[in-house]
Image (cartoon, rainbow, N blue to C red):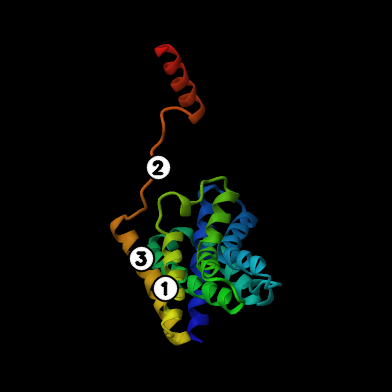
Amino acid sequence: MILSILDYLGTFAFALSGAFRAVKYELDLLGVFVLAVSTGVGGGIARDVLLGATPPTALKDGTYLAICIVASLAVFVAAKRIAQLWDMVLFADAVGLGVFAAIGAAKAESLGATPFTVILMASLTASGGGVVRDLLVREIPAALTSEVYATAALLGGGVWVLTGHFGLSHELRLTSTILVTWLVRVLSMRYGLSLPKVSRMPHSPSQIARGSRRGGSAKH
Protein backbone atom coordinates (compact mmCIF):
# COMPACT_ATOMS: atom_id res chain seq x y z
CA MET A 1 0.00 0.00 0.00
CA ILE A 2 2.75 2.45 1.00
CA LEU A 3 4.76 1.56 -2.10
CA SER A 4 1.73 2.25 -4.32
CA ILE A 5 1.21 5.64 -2.68
CA LEU A 6 4.88 6.53 -3.21
CA ASP A 7 4.62 5.29 -6.79
CA TYR A 8 1.67 7.60 -7.44
CA LEU A 9 3.47 10.47 -5.69
CA GLY A 10 6.52 9.95 -7.88
CA THR A 11 4.37 9.82 -11.01
CA PHE A 12 2.73 13.11 -10.02
CA ALA A 13 6.10 14.80 -9.35
CA PHE A 14 7.53 13.53 -12.64
CA ALA A 15 4.44 14.67 -14.52
CA LEU A 16 4.75 18.13 -12.94
CA SER A 17 8.34 18.45 -14.14
CA GLY A 18 7.25 17.45 -17.64
CA ALA A 19 4.41 19.95 -17.62
CA PHE A 20 6.74 22.74 -16.54
CA ARG A 21 9.00 21.98 -19.46
CA ALA A 22 5.96 22.67 -21.65
CA VAL A 23 5.51 26.02 -19.88
CA LYS A 24 9.10 26.89 -20.72
CA TYR A 25 8.33 26.54 -24.43
CA GLU A 26 4.81 28.04 -24.16
CA LEU A 27 3.09 24.94 -25.51
CA ASP A 28 -0.69 24.59 -25.61
CA LEU A 29 -2.75 22.40 -23.28
CA LEU A 30 -2.18 19.31 -25.42
CA GLY A 31 1.57 19.94 -25.34
CA VAL A 32 1.46 20.23 -21.54
CA PHE A 33 -0.40 16.93 -21.34
CA VAL A 34 1.95 15.12 -23.74
CA LEU A 35 5.07 16.18 -21.83
CA ALA A 36 3.49 15.38 -18.47
CA VAL A 37 2.48 11.88 -19.59
CA SER A 38 5.78 11.13 -21.30
CA THR A 39 7.69 12.13 -18.17
CA GLY A 40 5.35 10.51 -15.70
CA VAL A 41 4.99 7.07 -17.29
CA GLY A 42 7.43 7.01 -20.22
CA GLY A 43 10.15 5.15 -18.35
CA GLY A 44 7.80 2.46 -17.05
CA ILE A 45 6.25 1.90 -20.47
CA ALA A 46 9.69 1.58 -22.11
CA ARG A 47 10.75 -0.89 -19.41
CA ASP A 48 7.68 -3.08 -19.83
CA VAL A 49 7.99 -3.13 -23.61
CA LEU A 50 11.67 -4.12 -23.47
CA LEU A 51 10.94 -6.84 -20.92
CA GLY A 52 7.97 -8.14 -22.91
CA ALA A 53 5.50 -7.32 -20.13
CA THR A 54 2.72 -6.05 -22.37
CA PRO A 55 0.46 -4.22 -22.27
CA PRO A 56 2.49 -1.91 -19.98
CA THR A 57 1.24 -1.37 -16.44
CA ALA A 58 0.61 2.35 -17.04
CA LEU A 59 -1.81 1.44 -19.85
CA LYS A 60 -3.65 -1.21 -17.82
CA ASP A 61 -4.08 0.93 -14.69
CA GLY A 62 -5.83 4.17 -15.58
CA THR A 63 -4.71 5.76 -12.30
CA TYR A 64 -1.34 6.69 -13.79
CA LEU A 65 -2.79 8.58 -16.74
CA ALA A 66 -5.32 10.24 -14.44
CA ILE A 67 -2.48 11.46 -12.22
CA CYS A 68 -0.68 12.89 -15.25
CA ILE A 69 -3.85 14.68 -16.36
CA VAL A 70 -4.25 16.22 -12.90
CA ALA A 71 -0.62 17.37 -12.92
CA SER A 72 -1.08 18.87 -16.40
CA LEU A 73 -4.15 20.83 -15.39
CA ALA A 74 -2.53 21.97 -12.14
CA VAL A 75 0.45 23.42 -14.00
CA PHE A 76 -1.72 24.90 -16.74
CA VAL A 77 -3.89 26.71 -14.17
CA ALA A 78 -1.48 27.47 -11.31
CA ALA A 79 2.08 27.29 -12.64
CA LYS A 80 3.31 30.29 -10.62
CA ARG A 81 1.94 28.99 -7.33
CA ILE A 82 3.44 25.54 -7.88
CA ALA A 83 6.78 27.12 -8.81
CA GLN A 84 6.87 28.76 -5.38
CA LEU A 85 6.78 25.26 -3.86
CA TRP A 86 9.38 23.86 -6.25
CA ASP A 87 11.65 22.62 -3.44
CA MET A 88 8.83 20.32 -2.33
CA VAL A 89 8.33 19.15 -5.90
CA LEU A 90 12.03 18.31 -6.18
CA PHE A 91 11.86 16.39 -2.92
CA ALA A 92 8.91 14.38 -4.21
CA ASP A 93 10.75 13.89 -7.50
CA ALA A 94 13.73 12.44 -5.62
CA VAL A 95 11.43 10.08 -3.72
CA GLY A 96 9.80 9.09 -7.01
CA LEU A 97 13.22 8.43 -8.52
CA GLY A 98 14.00 5.97 -5.74
CA VAL A 99 10.61 4.29 -5.93
CA PHE A 100 10.76 3.95 -9.71
CA ALA A 101 14.28 2.52 -9.53
CA ALA A 102 13.16 -0.06 -6.96
CA ILE A 103 10.03 -1.00 -8.89
CA GLY A 104 11.95 -1.27 -12.15
CA ALA A 105 14.62 -3.50 -10.60
CA ALA A 106 12.06 -5.71 -8.87
CA LYS A 107 9.97 -6.18 -12.01
CA ALA A 108 12.99 -6.98 -14.17
CA GLU A 109 14.22 -9.55 -11.68
CA SER A 110 10.77 -11.14 -11.40
CA LEU A 111 10.81 -11.65 -15.17
CA GLY A 112 14.16 -13.46 -15.04
CA ALA A 113 16.45 -10.64 -16.18
CA THR A 114 20.19 -10.83 -15.56
CA PRO A 115 21.70 -8.63 -12.82
CA PHE A 116 23.09 -6.22 -15.42
CA THR A 117 19.69 -5.89 -17.06
CA VAL A 118 18.06 -5.41 -13.65
CA ILE A 119 20.31 -2.41 -13.00
CA LEU A 120 19.61 -0.97 -16.45
CA MET A 121 15.86 -1.37 -16.01
CA ALA A 122 16.05 0.42 -12.65
CA SER A 123 17.66 3.40 -14.35
CA LEU A 124 15.38 3.27 -17.39
CA THR A 125 12.24 3.21 -15.25
CA ALA A 126 13.44 6.17 -13.19
CA SER A 127 14.95 8.39 -15.86
CA GLY A 128 13.49 7.21 -19.18
CA GLY A 129 10.52 9.54 -18.99
CA GLY A 130 12.75 12.56 -18.55
CA VAL A 131 14.79 11.52 -21.57
CA VAL A 132 11.64 11.28 -23.71
CA ARG A 133 10.51 14.68 -22.42
CA ASP A 134 13.78 16.36 -23.35
CA LEU A 135 13.91 14.76 -26.79
CA LEU A 136 10.37 15.96 -27.53
CA VAL A 137 11.48 19.57 -27.00
CA ARG A 138 14.80 18.99 -28.81
CA GLU A 139 17.05 19.25 -25.77
CA ILE A 140 20.01 17.07 -24.82
CA PRO A 141 18.58 14.85 -22.05
CA ALA A 142 19.45 16.25 -18.62
CA ALA A 143 20.24 12.71 -17.46
CA LEU A 144 23.22 12.68 -19.87
CA THR A 145 24.62 16.12 -19.12
CA SER A 146 24.88 17.57 -15.64
CA GLU A 147 22.42 16.01 -13.23
CA VAL A 148 23.17 12.96 -11.07
CA TYR A 149 19.83 11.44 -11.97
CA ALA A 150 20.21 8.29 -14.04
CA THR A 151 23.40 7.61 -12.08
CA ALA A 152 21.48 7.63 -8.80
CA ALA A 153 19.01 5.13 -10.24
CA LEU A 154 21.85 2.92 -11.50
CA LEU A 155 23.31 2.88 -8.00
CA GLY A 156 19.89 2.02 -6.65
CA GLY A 157 19.65 -0.86 -9.08
CA GLY A 158 23.05 -2.04 -7.91
CA VAL A 159 21.82 -1.98 -4.31
CA TRP A 160 18.84 -4.14 -5.33
CA VAL A 161 21.13 -6.74 -6.89
CA LEU A 162 23.60 -6.64 -4.00
CA THR A 163 20.97 -7.03 -1.30
CA GLY A 164 19.57 -9.98 -3.23
CA HIS A 165 22.92 -11.74 -2.96
CA PHE A 166 22.79 -11.30 0.81
CA GLY A 167 19.33 -12.83 1.00
CA LEU A 168 17.51 -9.81 2.41
CA SER A 169 13.73 -9.77 2.42
CA HIS A 170 11.79 -8.17 -0.42
CA GLU A 171 10.72 -5.29 1.83
CA LEU A 172 14.26 -4.53 2.98
CA ARG A 173 15.54 -4.64 -0.59
CA LEU A 174 12.88 -2.17 -1.71
CA THR A 175 13.60 0.14 1.23
CA SER A 176 17.37 0.02 0.70
CA THR A 177 17.06 0.74 -3.02
CA ILE A 178 14.70 3.67 -2.47
CA LEU A 179 16.82 5.20 0.30
CA VAL A 180 20.14 4.96 -1.54
CA THR A 181 18.71 6.37 -4.76
CA TRP A 182 16.93 9.17 -2.90
CA LEU A 183 20.01 10.01 -0.82
CA VAL A 184 22.35 10.19 -3.81
CA ARG A 185 19.89 12.41 -5.67
CA VAL A 186 19.32 14.75 -2.71
CA LEU A 187 23.04 15.09 -1.98
CA SER A 188 23.75 15.85 -5.63
CA MET A 189 21.14 18.62 -5.59
CA ARG A 190 22.31 19.96 -2.23
CA TYR A 191 25.99 20.13 -3.12
CA GLY A 192 25.82 20.49 -6.90
CA LEU A 193 27.51 17.16 -7.54
CA SER A 194 27.91 15.79 -11.06
CA LEU A 195 29.96 13.27 -12.96
CA PRO A 196 33.15 14.41 -14.74
CA LYS A 197 32.47 15.89 -18.14
CA VAL A 198 34.39 15.35 -21.35
CA SER A 199 36.26 18.48 -22.45
CA ARG A 200 35.27 20.18 -25.67
CA MET A 201 37.91 19.83 -28.39
CA PRO A 202 38.98 22.92 -30.37
CA HIS A 203 38.30 21.13 -33.66
CA SER A 204 36.53 18.01 -34.90
CA PRO A 205 38.47 14.69 -34.75
CA SER A 206 38.82 14.64 -38.56
CA GLN A 207 40.34 18.15 -38.57
CA ILE A 208 42.74 17.21 -35.79
CA ALA A 209 43.75 14.05 -37.68
CA ARG A 210 44.35 16.00 -40.91
CA GLY A 211 46.41 18.55 -39.02
CA SER A 212 48.48 15.78 -37.47
CA ARG A 213 49.12 14.22 -40.87
CA ARG A 214 50.14 17.54 -42.40
CA GLY A 215 52.47 18.16 -39.49
CA GLY A 216 54.07 14.75 -39.98
CA SER A 217 54.48 15.35 -43.73
CA ALA A 218 56.13 18.71 -43.09
CA LYS A 219 58.77 17.07 -40.90
CA HIS A 220 59.72 14.79 -43.76
| Mark 3: amino acid | Val
Q: What residue did someone put label 3 on?
A: 184
Q: In front of the other: label 2 or label 3?
A: 2
**Crowd tier of the residue under label 2, counting other residues whose Cα lies within 10 Å: few below 14, some 14–19, many 20 or above:** few
Q: Position of residue 179 (x, y in %)?
A: 38, 75
Give the alpha-carbon distance from disc 2 to disc 3, as whole Å: 22 Å
Give the alpha-carbon distance from disc 1 to disc 3, as whole Å: 12 Å
Among the 4 quarters of the image, the one containing residue 107:
bottom right
Q: What residue did someone put label 1 on?
A: 159
Give the alpha-carbon distance from disc 2 to disc 1, as whole Å: 27 Å
User: Residue sitting at 47 percent across and 51 percent down?
Assistant: 144
Query: Taking the image as drawn, is residue 73 in sight?
Result: no
Q: Is residue 127 left or right of residue 168?
A: right
Residue 198 numbered mark, or none: 2
Q: Which structural element holds mark 1? A: helix
Q: Position of residue 56 (x, y in %)?
A: 67, 71
Q: Position of residue 215 (x, y in %)?
A: 42, 17
